[in-house]
Amino acid sequence: MAIIRGAPASGKTTIAKSMRDFSQKTVWLKVDNFKEFFSEENSLEEQKFVDECALSTLKYLLDQGFSVVMEKIFYDSSTIQFAITAAIDRKIPAKVFQIRCPLSVLQTRDRNRLGIQEGCRKPLGDETISRIYKKLEGTFFPGALELDTNELSVEECVVKIKSSLCLSL
């Protein structure tokens, strides 16, 4: 099981999506997909329920024999520890990957994300990206393996993740 943590526009989703392969029973668990179940808001109280739903889904997928690539910003790193414990309880290897990328690159990527030009979504904005970036840089998850998506391609990130989990390339 791979847990990918990083700022918005860092490449979490792109990497996780590229790793999914149903024929190999590898799935992508985008934790933020659970947000809309509760509301349009993003309060800490609602986030608790989002994380609990994702953890329940993670346990189900692991019990069904799936390899899971779980991704989120993960402000509260306790959710990461719960996910790791779920894998350990099932004797499944799990590693955390923290994406690093220069703030200026994240801000540029945010303005050019898919859907922005088409008007389907709005950028988060430089201030929001900066705030999240600083929070994550100050809370690097202990033992996480670093992926620099400014230096590494998506394919190189996938190879690093798979090789560190001893998965077939």
Image (spheres, rainbow, N blue to C red):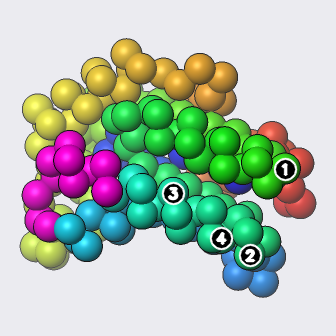
The residue carrying mark 2 is 64
Asked if the residue at tag 3 contacts the one at tag 1, i.e. Cβ–Cβ closer than 8 Å, the answer is no
Q: First in sequence: mark 1 or mark 3?
A: 3
Mark earlier in primary sequence (1, 2): 2
**Numbered tag placed on residue 55 in the rendering:** 3
Does label 2 or label 3 sit earlier along the sequence? 3
Query: Mark 2: which secondary structure?
Result: loop
Query: Image quadrant for the C terminus?
Result: bottom right
Q: Nearer the viewer, residue 68 or 160?
A: 68
The residue that appears at 58% across and 62% down in the rendered structure is: 58
Please tell me which residue is depicted at 81% across the width and 40% down the height of the picture. Answer: 164
Please state which amino acid type lies under the numbered disc 4: Leu
Residue 156: % across, % down: 69, 47
- Helix, strand or loop at mark 1: loop
Mark sitting on residue 61: 4
**Residue identified by numbered label 1:** 91
The spot of residue 4 in percent (x, y) is: 54, 45
Q: Residues within 10 Å of mark 2 (few under 14, many from 20)?
A: few
- Residue in front for this viewpoint, 92 or 119: 92
Q: Which residues are magenta?
A: 39-49
Left or right of 95, for residue 55: left
Provide residue 88's location: percent of width, then percent of height. Answer: 76, 44
Q: Is residue 53 left or right of residue 18?
A: left
Q: Is residue 148 left or right of residue 126?
A: right
Along the viewing direction, whichever of 41 and 27 lies nearer the viewer? 41
Look at the numbered discs 4 and 2 and tell me whether their residues touch, using CB distance below 8 Å. Answer: yes
Q: Is residue 111 left or right of 26 when viewed as pictured? A: left
Residue 129 versus residue 53 in the image, above or below: above
**In the displayed structure, would residue 23 be above or below residue 8?**
below
Q: Which amino acid type is shown beneath numbered disc 1?
A: Lys
Q: Few, some or many C-alpha atoms within 10 Å of disc 4 (few <14, some 14-19, many ≥20)? A: some
